[in-house]
Image: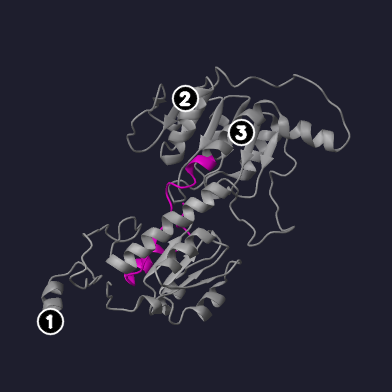
Amino acid sequence: ELRYSFPKADIRVLLVENVHSSAAAILRNQGFQVETLRAALTEDELLHRLPGLHVLGIRSKTRVTARVLDAAKHLLAVGCFCIGTDQVDLEAAERHGVAVFNAPFSNTRSVAELVIAEVIALSRRVADRSAEMHQGNWYKSAAGCNEVRGKTIGIVGYGHIGTQVSVMAEAMGMNVLFYDIVSQLPLGNSRPVDSLDQLLAQADFVTLHVPRSDATRNMIAAQQIAAMKPGAYLINNARGTVVDVQALADALRAGHLAGAAVDVYPTEPEKNGPHFSSPLQGCPNTILTPHIGGSTAEAQEKIGEEVAHVLAKLINQGSTLGSVNLPNLEMPFSSECHRILNIHQNVPGVLRDVNNIF
């Protein structure tokens, strides 16, 4: 039987925001103490639960601030059971030696499938026709409705999700263009363009797959929307800060754009209920969804498994492989020794001081 320098039964894990049960099962099988909560926690609620906590699992609503991390004396890791990590102060986590992990792969298919569904639904004006039928109005018309075959989709951000969209769109007979600030290998017959402006000028559908950052804030604003083809469509399932929603609403109401699908917003309600407001409400041929791009049973189960496994490897082996804020290291597992994971600034003398302890 393997022996650990710190009893595994004393490792305390808290999973909030209804993280999939697959994560709790994996971590409990490791012998850890695991507590689960359905709701997100406020900063004060999180501070109350921190004493003695070693691992925190969150989704997108719980904010792990510098204040939280300053008080987290025993915290070893934060697992983000989603793609984004902007809800965690990564610099503060790094200062405190807290590894932060996410799930960069598990929900890519779910998001990509939603994009393809929205491309077809927008092209056929499905949302408007459905709303009319629910109101008792029969309005059969081909006006403004088209097949997607032969149309051009422009993908902004050709990463895990963008490439999946590329493959599925091409399978439907669409022409695929993409723009990324990093050189990427084109899949199939997709073609890169040199600038965002080139993509906007050529695409019938523009879909965004970029992270939240200062560089991407309002990257699609009034100027970029005006540069899109008249009658084009915009899809944003990336981050709410990427699009100027007022400019988008103006373009939809003016008829410059034929439709839009939006799943993410600059500010989002903390909980379910009648709390949502956006300039996009009431715009023609506009599909609004409540940040459900990765919300499928398959994606949530895979996310739970993916993040739980990397958290367990950190605790058991000192592996930081997959961490978004610490150097990625993975040493072979050994049952003949105890591994010391010392996180420190890159200054001379640290290894000497560690060696002097023994």
Q: Residues within 10 Å of mark 2 (few under 14, many from 20)?
A: many
* The residue positioned farthest toward the front in the image shown: 1
Height in image: 191 above or below 90? above
Q: Residue at x 71, y 29 (%)?
A: 125
Image quarter (top left, top right, bottom left or bottom right) of the C terminus: bottom left
Give coordinates of residue 308: x percent, y percent. Answer: 42, 60
Residue 357 lies left or right of residue 242; in this view the side is left
**Dots 3, 2 in contact, CB < 8 A:** no
Determine which of the numbered discs, if any, sits on residue 117 in the image: 3
Magenta residue span:
83-111
The answer to whether residue 156 is visible is no
Q: Which residue is mark 1?
A: 358
Give coordinates of residue 169: x percent, y percent. Answer: 51, 27
Residue 319 lies left or right of residue 143; in this view the side is left
Height in image: 170 above or below 272? above
Q: Earlier in the sequence, mark 3 or mark 2?
A: 3
Q: Earlier in the sequence, mark 2 or mark 1?
A: 2
Judging depth in this view, the residue of 352 and 331 nearest the camera is 331
The Cα atoms of the two marked residues, 1 and 3, are separated by 61 Å
Q: Which residue is mark 2?
A: 176
Q: Residue at x 41, y 31 (%)?
A: 195
